[in-house]
Image (tube, rainbow, N blue to C red):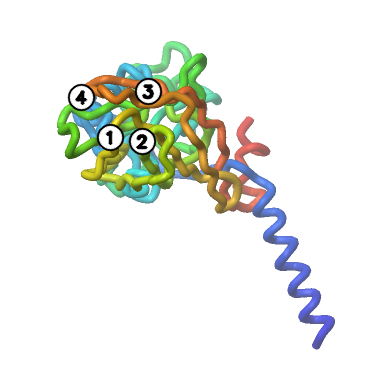
Amino acid sequence: MASSFLAFVSFFVLVISFANACERCIHQSKAAYYYSDAPILYGACGYGSLANESFHGYIAGAVPLLYKQGAGCGACFQVRCKNKKLCSPIGAKIVLTDQNYDNRTDFVLSRKAFSGMARWGMAQHLMKLGMVDIEYKRVPCGYKNKNLLVRIEEWSNKPYYLAMKFLYQGGQTEIKAIDIAQVGSSDWEPLKRNYGAIWDTSKVPEGALQLRIVVASGYDNENWIWTNYEIPADWKNGETYDTGIQIEDIAKEFCSPRECGDRIWK
């Protein structure tokens, strides 16, 4: 009996170790596209017109499992369609900016992102299909020469209420929590996720502000990051401020060797 139990434990550990070996899992689904990009530009993440400007039009809405009640906003995915005659083997890299409520597809892409999956000269043929079989994987976001930015929302009401969102969120991670404090103070006040990528508080510290951010990292771990630059005491609605940091953490997934994107995405 003891030897059987040890054999089972060894097998279980072996399975877990194989599952842990892969950073990015390949998922199979379908994708469609918006005939007008307006819904996706003003989608559930709250990026507004900045979605098109910041992510060069390669944007998408995703199902609730990927949207994660807003925590998935800003996540990057490599998506490729499976029609070998029409589809590029590389596909398109997209940024999640909206929630997709159609359970027939994991993604609804912008027109630019959908056509970006096509081989050279095949974009119009691909667009005519409307919906295609895809495979996709989570990938790190990278923004060359761009730090994480904080944008103060227009409906903030100094000194009683502050709402903000983040742009150019790098890495392969999610923002789990944000705290704010007056510069030099250790009296941190937690922000709450209002919706999508929007965080807010009705307890606004006085003076210049510092932030600390909790992001997902590794296998089910978290990492604290302190911003290098402060939000000035005279912050203004609609203004964008540089945090002085770049997020590079990788939140890893559990999947089998068969689903491992690092091995089979070629």
Q: Nearer the viewer, mark 1 or mark 3?
A: 1
Is any part of residue 248 visible from this angle?
yes
Q: Quadrant of the C terminus?
A: top right
Q: Quadrant of the N terminus?
A: bottom right
Front residue of 1 and 165: 165
Q: Earlier in the sequence, mark 4 or mark 1?
A: 1
Q: Secondary structure at mark 2?
A: strand
Q: Nearer the viewer, mark 2 or mark 3?
A: 2
**Residue placed under numbered mark 1 in the picture:** 206
Instruction: Give the Cα separation between the discs numbered 4 and 1.
Output: 16 Å
Q: Residue at x 22, y 22 (%)?
A: 236
- Circle 1 Cα neighbour tier, 10 Å, few/some/many (<14 / 14–19 / ≥20): few
Q: Secondary structure at mark 3?
A: loop
Instruction: Give the Cα separation between the discs numbered 3 and 4.
Output: 27 Å
Q: Secondary structure at mark 1?
A: loop
**Residue placed under numbered mark 3 in the picture:** 58
Q: Amino acid at mark 4?
A: Asn
Q: Please report contact status of discs 1 and 3: CB closer than 8 Å, yes or no.
A: no
- Circle 2 Cα neighbour tier, 10 Å, few/some/many (<14 / 14–19 / ≥20): many
* Residue 237 marker: 4
